[in-house]
Each structure stands twice: as structure tokens, then as C-alpha cells.
Image (spheres, grey):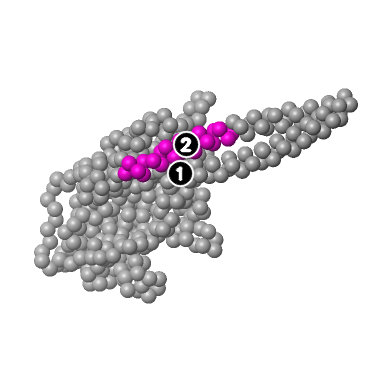
Amino acid sequence: MLQIDFLKNNKERVLNGLRVRNYSEKDLGIVDQILALDEKRRAIQTSLQQKLSERNAISKSIGELFKQGKTEEANNSRNKVTALKEEIAHLEGTLKEVKRALDDALLSVPNIPHESVPKGNTDEDNEIFKPYEGTLPALDENALPHWELAKKYDLFDLELGVKITGAGFPLYRKKGAKLQRALINFFLDEAEKAGFEEIIPPLMVNEDTARGTGQLPDKEGQMYHVTEDDLYLIPTAEVPLTNIYRNVILNEDDFPIKITGHTPCFRREAGSYGAHVRGLNRVHQFDKIEIVVIEHPDRSYERLQQMLKHVEGLLEKLELPYRILRLCGGDLGFTSALTFDFEVFSAAQKRWLEVSSVSNFETYQTNRMKLRFKEGKKTRLAHTLNGSALALARIFAALLENNQTPDGIVVPEALRPYTRFDIID
């Protein structure tokens, strides 16, 4: 959530940032609405304070008036206090309504894009930040997509997932289950080597937690909601991991805070149909290792580059061809100031598959969560960053497709200590 003072002091920057996100001039009116609500809030607060001070002063004088025998004057003062109490109650109710309207309006405004974010409407307008410079793998005409390879080698079963749960919930088995577990352990070990603390968080969160990282009210339609308990299945470990520090005041020497976690992720993915979402390309449950960093504002963009290097290292060790995109304004997540997407090339499908997003949210999440740090005698909002390191479903798919041979699917060398087999046959 944007800070109201930032919005007031940087109105043109906010408007230009929303234009990068393809806001129409009509939609930009939300900024003036917010400023008007804030002025109204301030005016009501001023009036309320005056009424409270007047009531307190008159209340204190009543006893003295009675002592002095000024009964009529004391009773008049009592009547004034009664009238003031009614006015105060009305002002308090109005202030509560205005504050709620102001908060709702602020929650409806996305983060302001970093100056490097390119303009654009859809993912087709994303900028290639780092192209793949090698030769893309080419397979023979008999090469199979991963969903066919899964049937051939009995690695995962989408039909059984439908039987047990529904579409989009794969069941992994045999060497497919071992490969999945190998990837999880490999990614966690690499994160630990990079200085991240491993955490196993809850898989369901409450409304305050989902609101803190921006899933509510923006993405409630994409989350599974346990209505009876008013809990949400997590769409990513980012949500519980980052909220560990909600309503916390840190010290400067606490930075950087680097945490990681493996969790299943649950996403409804409403409206996702077609050939491009076959197999593991888009599912409702998938495993992911998330890396989260809480950093000093002066160092967060340097930290973002380090996180990019970490994800690059994972893909290089898996010997997968990859490229990095800088997301345009139209494709940028609601809470993000700057996001880089990693895509790996699927040789059998002959297309790029997104496997990671690495983002800097600046103070957008921390303002919602009241995550601050002490800097001298003052407190400031920290910056939050996160990234997928990595999402497994499409990595799993690309490994199967790119490494298929007439003799079986070759396991990358980096994974062999974890799988304890070199080939899937």
C-alpha cells in the first residue's frame, strides 16, 4: 500500500507510474479521490480534537462552579457537555467511515513501477533483459511432450489426480516422485549455501496475513478459501514467510533477513484453458521453493541483482537454457515495483516456460504490514523482495522434455546425488 505522504509529495510520479500500468486518465482520478479523503480525514480529526478539548475543559469547570454556588451556570455547562458528547460521537463515527474509505481507496492502487519498467500492455511487451546466447536444444521428430513422457515412464498421473481431487492436481509416482523430491532438496541446499534460513511455514493463512503481502483484496478470486474457518490456502510461501515480520520493528544491523521455504502452492487459476496449459504447464497445486529477503531500502536493488544471480546459478546447474525478462507495466504484479521473470526453453513444446519471478516490492508490503526498522531515533519502512528458486512443475516438465533420449531421460549431474540414479528408463 502506498504511503499517503508519498502520494501527496510525489503526485506526478504516482500518476506517471499508473500510466505505465496503463491506467486511463479517468482511472487516474483515484489519486485525487485519495487526497480529498485525506483532507477530509484531517479536517474531521482537527474538529474532533477541538471538541474533545472543549468538553474536557468544561467538564473540569463544572465541579468548581458547584462549589462556588453557581448552580445554574454549572447545569448549563452540563448541558453543553452532553451536546458536545453527541457531536463527538457523530464526528468519531464519520471519521471511522472516512478512514475506511481512505484505506479501501489506498488498497485499490497498485505499487508504483520502478523507473526502469518498460511500458506495455501484455506479456508480449515484456523486455528481454538477458537473452539466451547458446544454441537451443533440438529434438528429433519423435520427441514427446512431458505429459506423454510421464505416461511412457510412469512418472506422474493427471487422471488419478482428477479421481482423487480434480483437474490440475497431479499425482507423482516412482522415479517421478524421486525426481520431484530431488529438486526440492537441491533447491533448499542451494538456498542454504547462499545464506538463507530454512523455514517450514503453515499452508493456510488468515485474512490479515493475506492482506499484508497484497493477495487481498487483489487476488481473492485466485485463492482457495476455507470459508468456515475464514482461512486461505497459500498461493506461494511468500505470504507466510514475509508475514513473520508483520508489526515488527527491526534494528539496522538485522539486515539482510534472508529466509527460504518449500511449500505446496495452491492457485485456482480460473479461466486457464487450452493447449498451452496441458500437463504440468498450469496446475492448481505445485511445489515451490521461495526465497524472501527483508532489506534496508538503500540496498534493496543491489540485493535484487544478487537474487537474480542465485536463480541463474540454479538453472545453469540444471543445464537448462534460460532467458530473463523485465516485465512491462501491463504485466507487472499489483504489489511489485520491479519484476524479472525467468523462462526456460521447452524443446518438445518449442516454447519458453516461466519458472521464476524475482521482485522488489520496496515499501508497498511493509506499509501494509507495518514492518519497520530503527534508524537513529526515527523508524522507517523496510523493503521486501522475493523470488521463486524455483517453481517445480515447469522445471520438472523442461527436464523431462529437454533430456529425453532413445535410451531414456538423462538426469542432470547436479541432481544425481539427490536422485541416486542417472537416467529414467
How crowded pointer 1 is (Cα within 10 Å; few <14, some 14-19, many 20+) is rated as: some
Q: Judge from the rendering whether residue 404 lies leftward or rightward of residue 183; answer left or right.
A: left
Q: Secondary structure at mark 2?
A: helix
Q: Judge from the rendering whether residue 72 lies leftward or rightward of residue 5; answer left or right.
A: right
In front: 120, or 275? 120
Q: Quadrant of residue 112?
A: top left
- Marker disc for residue 36: 2
- Marks 1/2: CA distance? 11 Å
Circle 1: residue type: Ala
The quadrant of the picture occupied by the C terminus is bottom left
In the rendered image, the vertical position of residue 421 relative to residue 38, given as above or below: below
* Residue pictured at 51% horizontal, 62% vertical: 227
Residue 14: percent from left, percent from top: 36, 36
In front: 340, or 150? 340
Residue 194: percent from left, percent from top: 35, 42
Q: Secondary structure at mark 1?
A: helix
Report if residue 269 is visible in the image. Answer: yes
The residue to which callout 1 is attached is 105
- Marker disc for residue 31: none
| Magenta residues (range) | 24-45
Q: Give the overall secondary structure of the magenta segment.
A: helix
